[in-house]
Amino acid sequence: MKKNIIFITLCVIMLTAFTQDKSLFFKDPLKVRYNLPQANAITTVSKSVKPFEVHFTPQVDNLYIGFKEALAFKESRGNYRKVNSLGYLGKYQFGETTLNRIRVYDTRSFLNDSKQQEEAFYALCSLNKWILKRDIKRSVGKKINGIEITESGILAAAHLAGAGNVKKYLRSNGQHNAYDAYGSDVELYMKKFAGYDTSFIKPVKNARL
């Protein structure tokens, strides 16, 4: 019996001395962060001697943040200081005329101000939502050329080509499809940015900074 106790003690000492896996004896709580697509959540699991603690935080993939970041990635790869070959500016690639419409006139300052760019994006979405509110009401849920029309798709297309061209697209049942200089069109944005929840954006007639 005494020999067995000594043998077990030696084994424990050896394992303690040589193991590289801290979680084996739960010395330090280790956290693992990963996505759970089916649960639409991010979970943090604390490995400790106690039962796992699971904390859920909702994903924002289909909310306003997901919408604006997806659009920004398409426009500039999310680069606040990007100026393209046609002079469009910032993370969301604003034209100077569009900026003037929401009372932004100093483009140099604008290019170096990330907060102002975010506010400008929201203001433009608010303005476009007000201009297109009747078309949104009439068209959301319908299909044009096999594409389901959603509010987020309409707002994304308006960012690309202007609210007027989106009206023409919807009212012509897809016959009028405006393109930009790089080949992107209203229909592409209508499809690519469909399905986001943009209810956070409030329609404002005279939206400005």
Image (tube, helix red, strand yellow):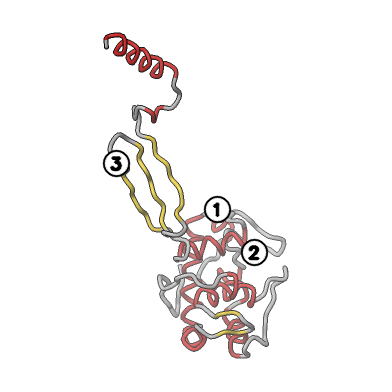
Residue 152, how many percent across, how many down?
Answer: 51, 73
Locate residue 139 relative to residue 29 in the image: left or right. Answer: right
Q: Is residue 135 above or below residue 128?
A: below
Residues at marks 1 and 2, CA–CA distance in whole angstroms: 14 Å
Image quadrant containing the C terminus: bottom left
Residues at marks 3 and 1, CA–CA distance in whole angstroms: 48 Å
Disc nearer the start of the sequence (3/1): 3
Residues at marks 2 and 3, CA–CA distance in whole angstroms: 54 Å
Amino acid type shown at disc 1: Asn
Dot 3 corresponds to which residue?
A: 51
Residue 169, how many percent across, how many down?
Answer: 62, 85
> Which numbered mark, 2 or 3, is in the foreground of this view?
3
Amino acid type shown at disc 3: Pro
Task: Give the residue at x 57% y 59%.
Answer: 91
Disc nearer the start of the sequence (1/2): 2
| Labels 3 and 1 touching (C-beta < 8 A) | no
Question: Which residue is more in the foreground, 89 or 198?
Answer: 198
Dot 2 corresponds to which residue?
A: 88
Residue 204, how many percent across, how many down?
Answer: 43, 77
Dot 1 corresponds to which residue?
A: 112
